[in-house]
Amino acid sequence: MKMNKIMLAMLALSVSGGAMAHGFIFEPPSRDTLCSANYSPVGIKNAECGQVTWEPQSSGENADGFDTANPSSGPRDGHLLSVSGESANYEAMNQQSADRWYKNPIQAGAHDFTWQFTAKHPIHSIKYYITKQDWDPNQVLTRASLEAEPFCVYDGHNSIPGVDSEGKPVMTLTHSCTIPQRTGYQVIYAGWDVNDTDKTFYKAIDVMFGEDSDQPGTPSSEWKVNVGSINPTIDLKAGSKVIARVFDQAGENTRLSVTLDIATDQAGMKANWAHDLAVKINAEQGDKLHAGQKNAAGEITPVYGLNDIYTKSGSPVSRVEIGINGAGHEDTTSVTVTGLKDSYSINNGKVTLDLNLQVQGKVAIEGNVFDANNQVKGHFDTGLLEDTAQDITLPMETVMPGNYSLVINSTQEGNTVPQQTLMFKLTSQDASGDYNYSWPDGLGTYKEGNRVLQPKTGKVYECKPYPYSGWCNQWTSSATQYEPGTGSNWQDAWIEK
């Protein structure tokens, strides 16, 4: 099964608080990894994780010897993801319900597992268990929830991550396991036995099985592409607004946005507004978007908690972001971004953004730049900042002309601060003024001789003379044959310049 990979070199391996750092599962990301702005490969998906937000690498460290037949071995039932001594700072990982955690889409069969290490320990072994098909996801995880034997055992031969045969640093381990057949929501329970201590690191990977290769569900489900999530982290007061902001390859599409007005403090409770926003998305944009939790049959139902947002295959929607206007919990945390220009000129395929972050309060900040195809072209992590200003130099390479989004995610003491999205354009150094529009801006008004920059190809296309010019404006999300440079019949309408 193919999985998207994100270069580990882009991750800042910072450690907060001086705690001893160890490791976590990066692919498919474990429950604790998805709590962390610093480490998650897909952004924060799990909220209210306590200390794990800052130290996923330290969670789950407990006694060796886990055995499903021996309740006294390893961590005790109901606390299978605890740290020795059961520190309350890490106990959030033991919470369990059908909608508590983000679920990685997955299939049975061969699959790569990648661990990211932040300290060098010899690897004795790594064992992987899986929940029984009929386990109860609304009960805390116990030995009785799991199959008696691990479905995969990796023998580490006491190897130490650190350097390869050429002396280059290696702080990851990737190996393959064959995942047994399941349907619906399951948990993979993994234990990395460290050879030079009496401890094992226990991790949970929340997964959703389905036959579709991109997202959980069955081929009969038309909602297969996950474009965002409603991940409630704060209670809101009456008078606040929550906005589902919809983006396609041209940038923000305000015609598809959905706004939820919070009428009462009760409606502003985080579980309530998350559910209500999902319901409203389905009511107002149900032909383009669907929000909720998806079951094994592909049915999507709004829940009081984390709701994923889906669109159909072939939809122009690339992502949905949740913004909040109004009063939440009482704090004075804010992140202000300055220095971003409206437009930049590409020089030899490169552009550098010079930004300044003004931070009030105590937050960790992550920034990602997305191109028109929703690919990450730039990234930064600040680590923990408090009441300060910080300059950011963000170089980008192999970029092409088009619309770009700078997405700023901030995390404050386990809670995510409302996301910010800032738009800008990149233009060709040699093509300044050489086109009239950036596709699909101006669609419906194109005429003979108009030149359009196609962000998907980075090339400029000129609308042909009459009678062919009429085809230049013939485009919908379900009829793309005349889209310049990419449609099946684009050459009937356009000339590549």
Image: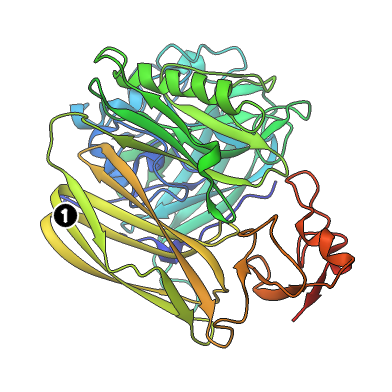
Image quadrant holding the C terminus, namely bottom right
Residue 28 visible, this angle: no
Q: In what element is the residue under mark 1?
A: strand
Q: Give above or below for 363 relative to 440.
A: above
Q: Residue furthest left?
A: 387
Q: Residue at x 25, y 37 (%)?
A: 414
Q: Which residue is mark 1?
A: 359
Frontmost residue, 76 versus 379: 379
Which residue type carries mark 1? Val
Instruction: State which quadrant residue 493 falls in.
Output: bottom right
Percent x, y of residue 105: 60, 36
Instruction: State which quadrant residue 216 falls in.
Output: top right
Percent x, y of residue 44: 39, 42
Horizontal side of residue 141 vs 365, given as left or right: right
Instruction: State which quadrant residue 379 falls in.
Output: bottom left
Q: Residue at x 62, y 25 (%)?
A: 286
Number of marks in picture: 1
Percent x, y of residue 454: 66, 68
Frontmost residue, 94 versus 132: 94
Horizontal side of residue 143 vs 436, given as left or right: left
Frontmost residue, 187 versus 178: 187
Frontmost residue, 43 versus 145: 43
